[in-house]
Image (cartoon, rainbow, N blue to C red):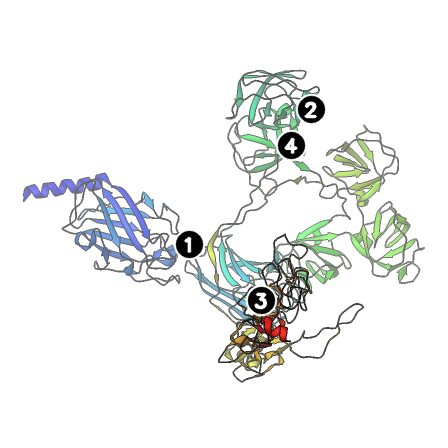
Amino acid sequence: MARRLVVVGCLLALLVRGDIDYAEISFYPPPPEKCAPTEITLTFEIAGGLQHLDTVYFYLNQFTRGGCNNGNGGKISDGLVLLGAPSGNDEWQAEYYEGSVDNMYNDSYIILKAKYDVIGTAGYRHTVVIDASNDIRPNCGSPANSSLMRVKGFVYKDAKAQYIRPVNKSDAVDLTCYMTDTRLKFRPAIPKESAQIEVRFRSAIHLYVGDRVRVQMAGWTSGKADGIPGSDDYYVAVRDDLAVIGNSTWLSGSWEEGCCYESHRAGFLNSTLVLTALQYIRAGTTVEVIVPRQQLRPQCGMPGPYVNQTMSVRRAGQRVYEYVKKPYPETTLDVALTDSATSVTLATGGAAALGPPVANSYILIGSEVIKVASVSGDVLTVTSGRAQSGTTAAAHVIGAKVYLLTESTLDGAITSTTATSFGVDLNTGGLGAAANTYILIGSEVLKVTAVSTNALTVIRAQDGTTATTHLDAAKVFLLKSNVKIEKEPYARQITETTINEGAAFSKSDTTLTVTSGTTLGAVANSYILIGSEKLLVSAVSTNDLTVTRAQDGTAAAAHADGAKVFRITETTVSDAGDGNANLAAADTTLSVTLNDPGLFAAVNSYIRIGSEVMLVTAVSTNDLTVSRAQDGTTAVDHTDGSMIYRLTESTLDGALTDSATTVNVDLNTAGLGAAANSYILIGSEVLLVTAVSTNALTVTRGQHETAASAHLDGAKVFLLKDTLDHTMEIDASYVSGVEVVAPRSIDEANAIGDGCKSLGFCTGKGECDHCTSTCRCPHAHSAVDNSYTSYSCEAINCPTGMAWADVPWHPGGAGDNTWAHYRRLPCSGAGLCTAAGKCSCFANFFGPACERRVCPGGSAETGDCSGHGTCATMKQLSMLPNALPLSKNNVSGFHAGDHVPYYEHHAHGRDDGTWDAMRLYGCVCDSSWPVGLGPGETQEPEYFGPTCAAQHCPSGDDPMTARDETNCTGVLAKGGHGVGEPGNLCHVDCSNRGFCDHETGQCKCFQGFYGHNCHYKDALAVQIE
């Protein structure tokens, strides 16, 4: 007994000390289906061995015994988990404990408790199978070797357990989570009417701030449901409860307008309501929010739930840039280069073309990167090690491209996210950065504002990237960028503040509360801009503005609390200054509704009304004296109320040489509007403004691949749009977040409109088109065109076919033919339609729609063609070489040797367009001899006539003539288009020397002639004659 206790103690100590050496979880079938009961195999080794009542815990990430509805399932206790081979219930007993939905079932686990028969040998690999009948199933996906698939062990009666650790290997659960308990409720549910939308869901995963619940709402639009698409990226107000003022604390809303409008259909298939999480939402939490009316509306009626109504979740995405690096300067090799040479000879002028390179520059030839040691003219001495940056030295031929790499490395780490200056190892001859260029370090874009040799001053985190730290020697790339040479259309926003409503400013509100009315400086008749909507201020009370919405052709829209509000430089025509409510083309005095603080025009300002540009020559409050038809425009009449814009342009006040760096303009403030770092355009030259002193501008000439040139006094000067920003060339600007909850149909949604209620729900036989409130009735007969014809699908129509007889129809127009048989009729007009929807055909017609004529000579006893022929359609008859009338072979356009009979309606004998081609039938009569126009063939078959009821008698040459009557060489076939070929035979019943009995096919010879074909003559009888 004592020795046994000592052994046990050693084993226990080994278990604690040795850990679980190896653990693996696998599933069958792989990969398991969502919510399907799954067989789970647990494999593990314990270095220290084990014995009776020792336990092993396996944590099964995302597994449940519930219905996968984000609710909790039951546990299996008391060792009642059914185990399969190979270990089975003899070695282990198992219990299952359900995790919690708010932990996303990461804490579901199985306990394996060792029984007496367990193999306790240290290092033995145990395999335990949890049978699928235990109903343990995956609720969500899990990657292979997930860190949340974990294992730990306990030694019996030992308080210390092994630490929990991930298993060594686990199978993937290849599926994503679903939203459950999803519901959409629309009030009112009327086509084309704006609706309040109630959204409910319960997520299988935790939602974090920025995660987006995407509700696909096919058939919905932010427009007016008039066929014109609404706005995309449209702000949507969302509330937790209509009774509570203010936006939702759970989610914010936006709208992605779908594509596209479809007449008489719901359309807008991918319209999506995007609900972005504003706070952390635990898995299993039921969320309910309301989208108030006056925002979204259905294009037409829809069933509920609709097949294209789904809900999914995307993790918050991030901006990922694949920037286009500035093209490398290039030249070519003037001398071939071996793989060990250290002297590189460039083409004449090559060094200058490269920038030129300097010591420590890097060049690229083929795929080899080479470091320059020194430069002498067009000859570069390179480092003896040659291939840099992991490339391989290689030989290069004469004329190979040589590039200077416009990149460098950091000369020291950037340890702060706010640092604005740092050094690079080589700028001139390397990176090539200058003021107003952009560089890329890691994923951060920086704007260079100043350069001093290799020291750069920068603005961090440009273009939506994030400032971060960077290691010493990190790569620095020069990015390709350019200024938009696009004129600023008119003066920019002057002053700004923000919306301070405490909630969204809805698209119908006419009272706007701003943070600071004083800062904004708006008065009655000022125009303001929020987003893309222009509003006219009609009254001001401190921070409350009374406004008229949707001015100057813009659309009213909802705006988020905190959105920016700008006062803009525009006004309207008041009258011409002469009491007339218009500005005539000859008038030079213009009265405006509000100049200051509205248009802010001054002497030498340029303004625009419609398409006409005018120069202001004098100002008296709201009366402007103007010089008409400037910039090549034409003076025209303008009505009272026309919009007036102040343009961002001026003229040179003095000529400008090609090297001058000071530009004097006639009017900057209230005119050109240039500031430091603005770009201006004179002629075709782009200039960078570095400083401004009233109307004197200090500039850098010839920017962005334009050339500095001289400009005349009075030359036009334009402010360029987006002057403070370069346009970055980016291959991909945004990568959406990972889809972590797959799209799944909405569980519950009410229908839009009454559908087909008034049509008795299509009598249960048809499908309702909810958009048009009409029934689509199924086909009852699959062979031909047919359908239910009553509006409610109640009455069944018979199959239809082209009419056998109908009034001819002439479509009109010169050269058009008269058409017949074009109309489709039930039973083709050759039968009666029964109540069962089947045709009862008239005599000699058959087919589901009575669309075919029976073959002649048919009877129950003999079948078609009196039992002596084959029934064929008109089309088939035209193509059979033995069908009468016989026709010639080898039609033009076919290869020699083809036997394609001539068909008068089509050169190739394959015209399917003839209305009766497949409807009329005829007989091809049987024959005991070959029939045709070829050698050895006879031009008539044995059986003949329309029903093949008559039979020819044996044929023979007339013994009383010198000519051979059976020779049909060159003889035209009866009713045909061809002649017999050499050796072709004519059929001569009874050799013309007897009567043929066409019922029996036997000859009755004239006197003096005998034989089966009467070909033989009795010489005596003939002589007596």
Vertical relation: 625 (above or below) 929 = above
Quarter residue 342 falls in: top right
Residue that mark 1 sits on: 175
Q: In the rendered image, is residue 656 in sight?
A: yes
Classed neighbour count for the residue bearing mark 2: other residues with Cα under 10 Å, few (<14), some (14–19), many (≥20):
some
> Is the C-beta separation of discs 1 and 4 under 8 Å?
no
Quarter residue 191 falls in: bottom right
Task: Say which element carries label 4.
Answer: loop
From the top left corner, tell me how far across and down residue 377 is, in percent.
Answer: 68, 15
Q: Is residue 812 left or right of residue 231?
A: right
The answer for how far apart the CA atoms under marks 4 and 2 are is: 13 Å
Residue that mark 3 sits on: 292
- Give the residue type at disc 2: Ala
Residue that mark 4 sits on: 327
Residue 353 tag number:
2
> Is the C-beta separation of discs 4 and 2 under 8 Å?
no
From the top left corner, tell me how far across and down residue 456 is, in percent.
Answer: 62, 29
- Give the residue type at disc 1: Leu
Task: Say which element carries label 1.
Answer: loop
